[in-house]
Amino acid sequence: MPRDVSPGLRDALVAQIGSLRAFAVSLCGDRDRADDLVQETLFKAWNHIDSFKEGTNLKAWLFTILRNTYFSERRKRKREVEDADGKYAARLAGAPEQHGHMDMKDFHAALTQLPADQREALVLVGAAGFSYEEAAEISDCAVGTIKSRVNRARSRLADMLHLNEPEDSAAGTPQKVTRTA
């Protein structure tokens, strides 16, 4: 809260409005913008009147505030994009993050529906990163059996998750494609 301001200081602030406005117009070249700058300058000056020492150059203090306000706003505007209608922001929007979580829940539910031998083979080869030979050794079966189980598991998952079906060809949505080993 500003200190008690003497009537003389208040009058001196008001007396500078014309000079501030002329200086603001010379900086920005726009009368409406200049009025906004003067208003912002007086607002800042009033809120920081405690930092002004009476008897010093009030005009220079106010002009410094106005000039700093103007250049600060210009720097800020360089980093901003005017987007009154929201078109620019709409282009920047990303897909919701929830889909990945929901896809994982669907995958987990489908994986639990696979027969145990197919699920084991798929997890060993697909998730744990074992080779077919290593998975066959772990499962105590032939390499061909592991390959067959993995292939059947992938095919069943793709069917359960509807990965082989086009989503909406008319809308231009790409189709999901499955990879088999």
Image (tube, rainbow, N blue to C red):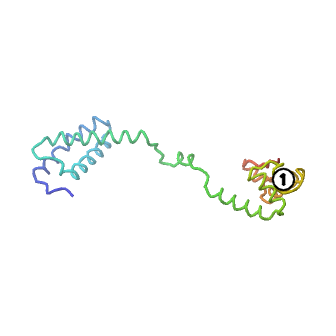
Q: Residue 91, how many percent across, how many down? A: 57, 46
Give the residue at x 19% y 39%. Answer: 19
Q: Nearer the viewer, residue 104 or 139?
A: 139
Tell me if 134 is positioned left or right of 42 in this view: right
Quadrant location of the N terminus in the rendered image: bottom left
Kindly indicate the quadrant of the structure image that contains residue 102: bottom right
Q: Residue 153, how many percent across, how many down? A: 83, 56
Q: Residue 175, how many percent across, how many down? A: 76, 49
Tell me if 68 is positioned left or right of 154 in this view: left
SS at badge 1:
helix
Give the residue at x 75% y 53%. Answer: 167
Kindly indicate the quadrant of the structure image that contains residue 140: bottom right
Give the residue at x 23% y 40%. Answer: 64
- Depicted 32 relative to depicted 140: above or below: above
Q: How many marks?
A: 1
Kindly indicate the quadrant of the structure image that contains residue 115: bottom right
Which residue is disc 1 drawn over?
137
Tell me if 75 is positioned left or right of 57 in this view: right
- Depicted 71 relative to depicted 115: above or below: above
Q: Check disc 1 and give the amino acid type.
A: Glu
Q: Residue 45, how many percent across, how many down? A: 22, 48
Q: Nearer the viewer, residue 158 or 127?
A: 127
Crowd band around label 1 with a 10 angstrom C-alpha radius: few (<14), some (14–19), many (20+): few
Give the residue at x 77% y 61%. Answer: 111
Tell me if 55 is positioned left or right of 135 in this view: left
